[in-house]
Image (spheres, helix red, strand yellow):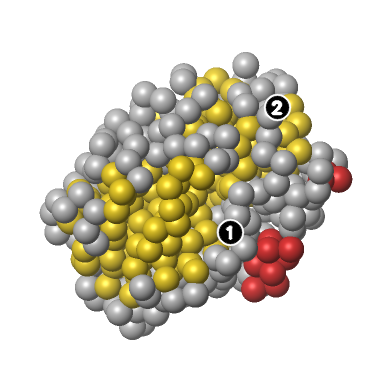
Amino acid sequence: MTLAISVMLAGAAACSSEDAPPHHPLSTAVSSSSAGGAGTAGAGGAGGSSASGGAATGGGGAAVMLGAIALVDEPDTPCSPTKAMAVEIYAGADSPPALDRLARVGTRWMASGAAFPSGFVTFDNDGTGASPAPVKAADEDVDFAASEGTSIGRAGQKGTEIVYTRFDDQDATIAGPLTVAGVSPVNLSIGGDGEGGALVLWGEGGAMHARPVVDGVLAAAFEFGAGTLDTYFTGSVAGAGKGVFGAAWSSAVGTKHVSSFAKLGAGGPVAGVVPLTSTPIVHSIVKVVKTSLGYALLMQADFQPLTAVVVQVDADGALLGPGHRLLGTTVGFDLAAIGSGDGFAVVARRSSKEIQLRTFDANGLALTPWICLGGPSTDLFASGAVAGDGDGYAVIYRDDVTHGEMLLHVDKLGSL
């Protein structure tokens, strides 16, 4: 078995900067996002620097601001090994795709790439029964998948169209491809509600657009967020109940980098677009997930160096206290809420090049130190993903020695 990697290599060639990745979205899964959060790792470090146009990042507890968002620093501490035992999904010799999104689909798992889109794969809870090759349409330039609960929704760009296709958890096509819109979007994304529905999100003509999918059937498209993006956006969609979604996105608008949030239903926005921040500091939305308090957002912000940031908002998008700047990280790959929603986990790359995991409670307080998912890696496709798994998490990552794709299950403290 050899898993195709040519699409990823094309993406790698385009993705020469963490701030300017390819034109495609950076996310999928039950919560999904669009391109702009990850890429090749850059230099890392702790606090004490300042970002162009932003507040000084003083190491002694001074305020750190990402525009309107206040941040507190999580110290840069070395990661420690986990006691959990990993199993191999794909051997390194199989050239597995770079997987940085993970979601439960029925009784199986679905994983996909966001930084390097190359289709999705599925596998059993113990890592066996994996797809023999990524499920990808040859005539779609890019495509992204999201769990709809027991099915998979995939959105892709096919020439001058956005198309949607539905699959079961064994990779078989159920419906589609269906034409979502006859446009060439500036970016796109898809998120699932976990109850048979999905929302396809794209940018076009200076506004955001979305089209719900209910049990594989397209509903009416709608427009919102005019003026919140220019020629490109990065963003994410999270299911918040049947037919209800939270969407967050970032874009350069004029001289500022702007991030926004909207609560969306089957008929359009439930309320007005909520501005989260507008700042000269380059930043992007990587992932949004539903939590017991509202939503948690994983962001990348160029505080020189680039650093992962976690911010929480309530169900309507209002900021909940200060966010957390995760010092020592250079790329935030993925974010997932625990099954109850009373906590979340982050997978990121350290400045010393390890892929690492950390878990947090519902208020964003760290429950664990950083946990290493292997040693330092120079593998271009080294990445990781996380998903809620009952009272713990399922985690996948690229092994730094074998370059195989690994799966492990941990409790909320990062161990068995």
Badge 1 marks a residue whose secondary structure is loop
Q: Does residue 144 appear in the picture of this structure?
A: yes
| x and y percentages locating residue 281 in the rendered image | 42, 70
Quadrant where the C terminus is found in the figure = top right
Mark 2 or mark 1, earlier in chain: 2
Q: Is residue 338 left or right of residue 223?
A: right
Q: Is residue 183 above or below residue 407?
A: below
Badge 2 marks a residue whose secondary structure is loop
- Residue placed farthest to the bottom in the image? 254
Which residue is depicted at the point 30% across and 79% down? 205
Q: Is residue 185 left or right of residue 35?
A: left
Q: Which mark is residue 166?
A: none
Callout in the foreground (2, 1): 1
| x and y percentages locating residue 395 in the rendered image | 60, 33
| x and y percentages locating residue 113 in the rendered image | 59, 52
Mark 1 is on which residue type? Ala
| x and y percentages locating residue 101 in the rendered image | 55, 45
Q: Is residue 139 above or below residue 118?
A: below
Which residue is depicted at the point 81% across and 48% down? 2
Q: Quadrant of residue 320?
A: top left
User: How many numbered marks are there?
Assistant: 2
Which residue is depicted at the point 39% across and 48% down? 191
The foreground one among 415 and 367 is 415
Q: Quadrant of residue 411?
A: top right
Q: Quadrant of residue 70?
A: bottom left
Residue pointed to by mark 1:
137
Q: Does residue 387 appear in the picture of this structure?
A: no
Mark 2 is on which residue type? Thr
Residue pointed to by mark 2:
128
Which residue is depicted at the point 38% across and 63% down? 179
The foreground one among 330 and 199 is 199
Q: Residues within 10 Å of mark 2 (few under 14, many from 20)?
A: some
